[in-house]
């Protein structure tokens, strides 16, 4: 692994041996100066943690995996998954049609880039540690990956795992609730609400008193169904934070919603069709809530039916209905289930959709690289009455990113060139933190060490410069390691023992000796009386009686006798 310059949070010990013992290493195996295949390695005090286990959408087969060959999977103690979000590539069968038609395929942004290599890592490597994710994340994880396997158009050689591997991985995944503290091999960790998508979590890890916060994808903005990301109650020593949007700023949500609905209404009024490249879950549910409410408030649109068709999305919506208590007050306090849409009805098959008259189609994938969204784009892009509304993050190299700049021509899937006459609107509803949210979040946390991940190199560099200006008077270290480039930091490993129980009943005088049993658990030390051992630990005391018989000669004639002693 490569290495950046060392960063010191506390004074390192002088001896080289102690320095090695005090060294903490963070290495991106994915998402280092890139968006995709999130996977970050953490090592300290002989303990190792892996954050996330995604794939890169621009590649297939082994090339899409994080750089697992840089580590020994058998040494990983804990694997923590922040979300199930899978950025899927080809989804042929998810449609939501709004005559206004909302189509969305099963491959969604429910992030393959955070969890999709998990079945491979659990079943195809030597990993033997423990893996954790939240309840909602596990509930959707299996649905999405199973569907991903079924619809993926890749060769057997490029298939990283099958449905059997997914089922086997489910048995190994343990669940964790928000704010629940778990300890594994001396590693303590707990998680906070991250916003972004249902079940998304930020993990705080504590090893020997050094705390590391890994945000994963997060959002500080509450929307129509999700809470905003929480702020941890104390500052971590290291914050590993996403930088997806760099220095970009989101518009206020009410303005974005107005632009979104106006763009749709305008296109329908001129007899056009509207394509919304989106993902099956996450932002799709948010946009459906907006559209359903807008239709309710505009009777002139209610004769335009909204169809919703996708076995996967329907199953996942049942998970949304199950975990409404994990959402915001708007959802929890609703009189009826808001995910039972009044103006959106199911469409049993794509064949039942006839492309006649104005329509709005929300189709997957969001990048327009394949699937239904691309097919409809090719059909509609040359008609100036039509519109394309891009509601989420557009990855470099995708058609969605290209048409944001409104080129005069585009290349269709059949290789022919066609004029781009339809209007293009980029209105981001992406649930990633923008520059303002990131700056405010870090201002509250004030971590001495910040590591930026999950961002394109240029945008990440601009964000780093902005943060360096923001924290210039605080000696804050801001790092942007590339994949396989290690960051080394040194933390003093001063050992401190806490007196408890009877030993702590009296405050000792200066110079007075304190006697007791020293008990170590993980990286914590406690001094206690032997009588308290069973109270404060799982250990207990016992009395051992030993009998010793010593023969010896005595008396004038050397009579033999013995002495028995109890010890």
Image (tube, rainbow, N blue to C red):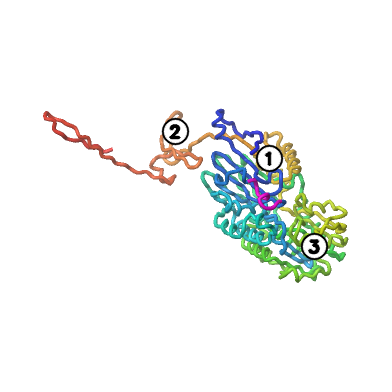
User: Residue 326, how many percent across, how many down?
Assistant: 62, 57
* N-term-proximal mark, 2 vs 1: 1
- Horizontally, is 11 left or right of 519 in the view? right
Q: Quadrant of residue 410?
A: bottom right
* N-term-proximal mark, 3 vs 2: 3
Which part of the image, by quadrant, shows the N terminus?
A: top right
* Disc ID at residue 481: 1
* Disc ID at residue 504: none
Between the residue at mark 3 and the residue at mark 2, the CA separation in whole angstroms equals: 79 Å
Residue bearing mark 2: 508
Relative depth, front residue between 517 and 406: 406
- Horizontally, is 301 left or right of 315 in the view? right
Q: Is residue 62 magenta?
A: yes
- Horizontally, is 99 left or right of 30 in the view? right
Between the residue at mark 2 and the residue at mark 1, the CA separation in whole angstroms equals: 49 Å
Q: Secondary structure at mark 1?
A: loop
Residue bearing mark 3: 376
Would residue 468 be visible to someone looking at this image?
A: yes
Q: Is residue 382 magenta?
A: no
Relative depth, front residue between 560 and 300: 560
* Mark closer to the observer (2, 1): 1
* Mark closer to the observer (3, 2): 3
Which part of the image, by quadrant, shows the C terminus?
A: top left
Q: Secondary structure at mark 3?
A: helix
């Amino acid at each position: 692994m490569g290495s950046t310059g060392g960063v010191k949070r506390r004074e390192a010990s002088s001896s080289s041996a102690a320095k090695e013992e005090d060294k903490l290493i963070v290495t991106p195996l994915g998402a280092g100066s890139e968006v995709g295949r999130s996977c970050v390695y953490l090592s300290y005090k002989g303990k190792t943690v892996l954050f996330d286990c995604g794939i890169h959408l621009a590649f297939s087969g082994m090339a899409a995996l994080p750089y697992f060959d840089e580590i020994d999977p058998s040494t990983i103690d804990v694997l923590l998954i922040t979300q199930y979000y899978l950025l899927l590539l080809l989804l042929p069968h998810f449609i939501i049609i709004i005559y206004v038609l909302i189509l969305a395929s099963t491959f969604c942004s429910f992030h393959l880039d955070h969890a999709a290599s998990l079945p491979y890592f659990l079943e195809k490597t030597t990993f033997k540690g423990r893996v954790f994710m939240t309840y909602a994340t596990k509930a959707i994880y299996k649905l999405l990956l199973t569907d991903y396997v079924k619809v993926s158009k890749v060769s057997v050689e490029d298939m990283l795992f099958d449905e059997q591997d997914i089922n086997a991985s489910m048995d190994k995944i343990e669940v964790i609730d928000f704010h629940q503290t778990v300890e594994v091999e001396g590693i303590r960790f707990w998680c906070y609400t991250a916003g972004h998508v249902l079940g998304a979590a930020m993990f705080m890890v504590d090893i020997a008193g050094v705390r590391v916060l890994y945000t994963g994808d997060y959002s500080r903005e509450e929307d129509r169904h999700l809470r905003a990301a929480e702020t941890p109650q104390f500052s971590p020593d290291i914050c590993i934070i996403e930088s997806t949007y760099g220095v970009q700023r989101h518009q206020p949500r009410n303005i974005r919603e107005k632009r979104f609905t106006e763009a749709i209404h305008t296109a329908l009024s001129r007899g056009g069709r509207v394509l919304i490249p989106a993902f099956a879950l996450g932002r799709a549910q948010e946009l459906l809530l907006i559209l359903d409410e807008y239709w309710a408030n505009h009777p002139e649109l209610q004769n335009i039916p909204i169809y919703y068709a996708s076995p996967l999305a329907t199953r996942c919506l049942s998970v949304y209905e199950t975990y409404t208590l994990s959402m915001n007050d708007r959802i929890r306090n609703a009189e009826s289930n808001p995910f039972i849409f009044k103006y959106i009805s199911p469409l049993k098959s794509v064949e039942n959709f006839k492309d006649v008259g104005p329509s709005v189609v929300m189709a997957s994938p969001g990048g327009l690289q394949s699937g239904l969204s691309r097919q409809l784009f090719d059909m509609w892009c040359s008609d100036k009455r039509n519109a394309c509304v891009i509601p989420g993050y557009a990855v470099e190299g995708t058609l969605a990113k290209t048409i944001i700049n409104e080129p005069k021509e585009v290349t269709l899937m059949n290789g022919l060139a066609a004029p781009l006459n339809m209007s293009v609107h980029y209105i981001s509803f992406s649930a990633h933190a923008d520059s303002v949210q990131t700056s405010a979040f870090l201002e509250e946390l004030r971590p001495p060490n910040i590591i930026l991940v999950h961002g394109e190199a240029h945008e990440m560099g601009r964000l780093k410069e902005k943060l360096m200006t923001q924290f210039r008077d605080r000696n804050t270290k801001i790092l942007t390691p590339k994949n396989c480039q290690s960051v080394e930091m040194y933390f003093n490993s001063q050992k401190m023992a806490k007196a408890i129980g009877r030993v702590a009943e009296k405050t000792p005088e200066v110079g007075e000796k304190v006697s007791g049993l020293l008990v170590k658990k993980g990286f914590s030390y406690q001094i206690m009386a032997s009588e308290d051992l069973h109270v404060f630990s799982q250990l207990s005391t016992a009395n051992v009686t030993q009998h010793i018989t010593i023969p010896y000669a005595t008396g004038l004639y050397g009579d033999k006798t013995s002495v028995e002693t109890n010890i």
